[in-house]
Image (cartoon, rainbow, N blue to C red):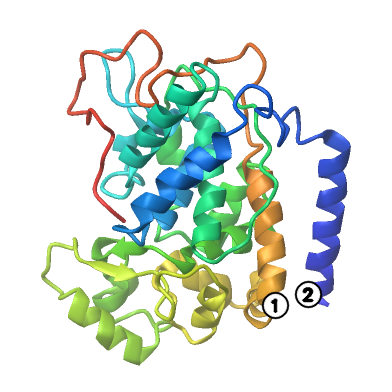
Amino acid sequence: MGSMRIVLGVALWCAVLMHTGYAQLSPSFYSQTCPFLYPIVFRVIYEASHTDPRIGASLIRLHFHDCFVQGCDGSVLLNNTDTIVSEQDAFPNRNSLKRLDVVNKIKTAVEEECPNTVSCADILTIAAEVSSILGGGPSWPIPLGRRDSLTANITLANQNLPGPFSTLDQLKASFLVQGLNTTDLVTLSGAHTFGRARCSAFINRLYNFSGTGNPDPTLNTTYLQTLRLICPQNSTGNNLANLDLTTPNHFDNKYYSNLQNLNGLLHSDQVLLSTPNADTIAIVNSFSNNQSLFFLNFRVSMIKMANIGVLTGDEGEIRLQCNFVNGNSAGLARGGSKDGLLSSL
């Protein structure tokens, strides 16, 4: 019954997309003005993946963290200046965003082919889909036509982005604010099928969960010992662990079977299955049993997320550099990074 509800939800949303025309966006938006856009984005990411197998996870994360703050407008890419306080310094983003340098490289290549035409927000959206494909995951039609914001909002970044310690109710509330439902929550969490997290994001589960002085009881005891080797109790918390214990560099549905075996790395992962009587449990089990169903829902949820708060028409601008609004690329303030390169997650 749970799988049937998911399938019906997918069919309904696909019908909505067909009727609304992607809410003013279109997969053919650049067909005349920049026909080689997709191959350019694909080439840059493909080349970067040769030396960084985790690049796909990094780029999907960037897209997610962009869309949850002011909408999908490229605001997460903006560096600190005398007029901008960067979202990259927000607590959920600090030391966890990676490969903004690759986004800049894509932008440079696109500008050479199609000057002042393609937004950085659209580049992030395409990069997320390419990242899924290169990891072995699904593809989907990419609605395009976004424009870039003129502002960033560190306050919203601190408020809106769910953290690794979130409860299920907090996760649901965070997604609901963005117009995303419980199925979207479980589906988009599946992006943790690849990538890594720092020990600081989950070390409380290993030694002193909720102040009890004991490990999280919803953590597999064998996995607990493995993680304690990676993250000693008195360590700095900067070591990295794979988000997916089983297939860490491949986009598949193993994330959900990991949850079934109590091998979810983050508390915000495991609560999808381990919260008593939660409506997320049936969705996790359905996706674990049926990878095609997960992929189908991931396509839908990614398109849905990419429509959050978009700027179109005469709104915003087409940035010439992704890290700066046009006309304000000098004078970094408060330690901003010139190329936007931050520590990895």
Identity of the residue drawn at 31% across and 26% down: 79
Quarter in which the N terminus is drawn: bottom right
Q: Label 2 belongs to which residue?
A: 2
Q: Label 1 belongs to which residue?
A: 286
Q: Is residue 104 left or right of residue 275?
A: left
Q: Residues within 10 Å of mark 2 (few under 14, many from 20)?
A: some
Identity of the residue drawn at 43% across and 23% down: 112
Mark 2 or 1: in front is 1
165 or 243: nearer the viewer: 243
Is residue 19 visible in the rendered structure shown here?
yes
* Amino acid type at mark 1: Ser
For label 2, the SS is: helix
Quadrant of res 103: top left
Q: Residues within 10 Å of mark 1 (few under 14, many from 20)?
A: some
142 or 17: nearer the viewer: 142
Identity of the residue drawn at 57% across and 22% down: 147
